[in-house]
Amino acid sequence: MTDRALAPTKTSRGAWGQFALYIVLTVGAIISFAPFFWMISSAFKQPAEIRAYPPVWISRNPTMDNIIKIWGELDFSLYFRNSLILSITPTVIILFTSALVGYVLAKVRFPGSNIVFLSVLATMMIPYPVTLIPRFQMMIWFGWMDSYRAIIIPGFYSSFGIFLVRQFMDSIPDDLLDAGRIDGAAELRIFLQLILPLMKPVLAALGIFQFMWSWNDFLWPLLILNTQDKFSLPLAIAAFTSENIVDYGATMAGAAISVAPVLIVFLFLQKYFVSGVAMTGIKG
Amino acid sequence: MGSFASEPALRGHGKGLKQGTWTIVALAIGPLILSYGIFLIFPMIYAFVMSFTNWNPVSMRTPLRAVGVANYSELLFKDPLFWTSLKNTIYYAALRVPAGLVISMVLATLINSLRRLKGFYRSIYYLPVLTSTVAAAIMWNWIYQPRFGLLNSVLASLIGSLGLQVSGMPRYLMDAKMAMPSIAVMSLWKGIGYDIVIFLAGLQGIPSSMYDAAKVDGATGLQAFWHVTVPLLRPTIAFIAITGVIGSLQVFTEMYIMTQGGPVNSTRTIVYMLFDQAFVNSRFGYASAISFVLFAVIMAITLLQRRVLATEWAY
């Protein structure tokens, strides 16, 4: 693969054109990155520097005070643990259920499979506010208020995940599965030993998405959880911020800490992430 | 396509389904139907029925009774806040969706014609997508702070270095006229990275021979963009426009954290109103009516969009 094949413009103006492209994109990237940079750098600033004019971009005398303060006042390790539980549990469950249902809908023929798939697609059209209120009422009936059950159990299945896996399975040739069947392997064993390993790319993408959504989820946990000890990170930070609205150093530190895990996951699994986003765009 | 690629693997395996096949189908589909039945279908039907009652989960003194279409008629004809919220919500979508579409399509096209560092730029623009709304709101509250926020500080030093004088700086979230556009800008910042990646995937599907043909015809870069890239990206554009509108019409958390619906209700959206009626006033019946009106609005706009996006560019 040559550079020329990739670039639509390759005349003598090409070099200048490329240069101009980099300039435009870099300016955009700086604008896009500035708020991030500001958040992270503010987390390490002295109080005076935070309100300084002209703005201080990098602290001359970085401090850990903001982080120590918010960690001390918020018992961050607790909220961190809560957020991990509330993100990893649904992610693992949804990965398994999406893989199973997506595989069955793509590769196992049974009466009504098309209806099931279309119904799953149709549920993606239901706006969340429509089920928000009755679900809340149901959580009261079930006695699940202020409990993680209310957050985890209603979300065992993800229509988006099922859709993603099914689309992916379409690209895997049937011969591969038939080979397993001729060997006389049971369907469930074929699924666990043959199919699951094949699904690695789509499951990685789905896993990252789901982790990100669960980690950042706000409204439903806000409605369900009342005990502060059970709060997830976004809830704790929102509560802290509304009480310490002027302490920008500490709130910025909190925001930075809450973003960090998703950033780390992204950096490590970047290529899956990108292919995952691309998969969502395949079919409108 | 689809039907051929998804031709079932079990074809030709004798009569009917084998025992093992039934097991896996039952394991996969049974719990799915149960789960969606309990947590999606039942709640939706229940809420629709209850939107015709005075449903209130807190008050024991007011017994549940049917009120006919009273909730809907109150909402549509007697509650001025509904029309304000609807107007605000549509205003937000109108600010957010077209701007996001244009910016992300242009940036994706630019990134796609880079020779090196494509991945780097894609990642930089993607970073804000990873931020939670809560963290983004905290960041941008500070950026928009009128007195010493980042934006006005940068503006002031720019203006100062030009030797100009200004009387008053913009007040962003504290100004009823600017609050909604300010939130839309934050949302653009947070959202375009995702659209860029989708557009990049769409651009991969355009064969470079199309551009070569355009060049033979003497097209400039801009003409090629307009006559080759844009028409061929039509499915992607439709996808992003439709999902963008659906998402924008349900916007809530940004306003809840950044402005609490103010100043003077200028950022109160439909879902915000629903939230207030349900979880502040405990009027579940009324709030359910709001949710179904929103559902209808979303359906109507989506259908309209599909029609427009399908016909406008049909050759």
Image (cartoon, coloured by chain):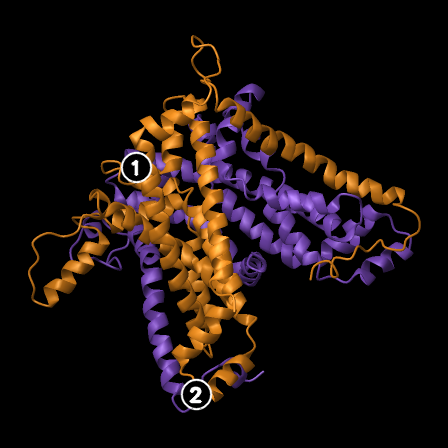
Residue B155 occupies which quadrant of the picture? bottom left
State the orange chain: B
**Chain at tag 1:** B
Q: Earlier in the sequence, mark 2 or mark 1?
A: 1
What kind of element bears circle 2?
loop
**Chain at tag 2:** B
**Mark 2 lies on residue:** B218
Mark 2, other Cα within 10 Å: few <14 / some 14–19 / many ≥20: few
Do circles 2 and 1 both sit on a common chain? yes
**Mark 1 lies on residue:** B84
What kind of element bears circle 1?
helix
Residue A61 in view in this figure: yes
Spot occupied by residue B259 in the image (x, y as percentages of width and height): 28, 39
Decide which of B50, B189 is in the foreground and name it: B50
Assign the C terminus of chain A to one quadrant of the image: bottom right
Marking on residue A69: none
Decide which of A31, B1 is in the foreground and name it: B1
Q: Residue at image x 47%, y 79%?
A: B115
Residue at the extreme bottom: A12
Spot occupied by residue B209 in the image (x, y as percentages of width and height): 55, 82
State the purple chain: A
Q: In the rendered structure, which amino acid carries the disc numbered 1?
A: Thr
Residue B271 occupies which quadrant of the picture? top left
Spot occupied by residue A21 in the image (x, y as percentages of width and height): 37, 77
Q: In the rendered structure, which amino acid carries the disc numbered 2?
A: Gly
Q: Residue at image x 43%, y 90%?
A: A11
- Separation of residues labelled 2 and 1 (CA atoms): 51 Å
Residue at the extreme right: B14
Assign the N terminus of chain A to one quadrant of the image: bottom right
Residue B276 in view in this figure: no
Spot occupied by residue A131 in the image (x, y as percentages of width and height): 52, 32
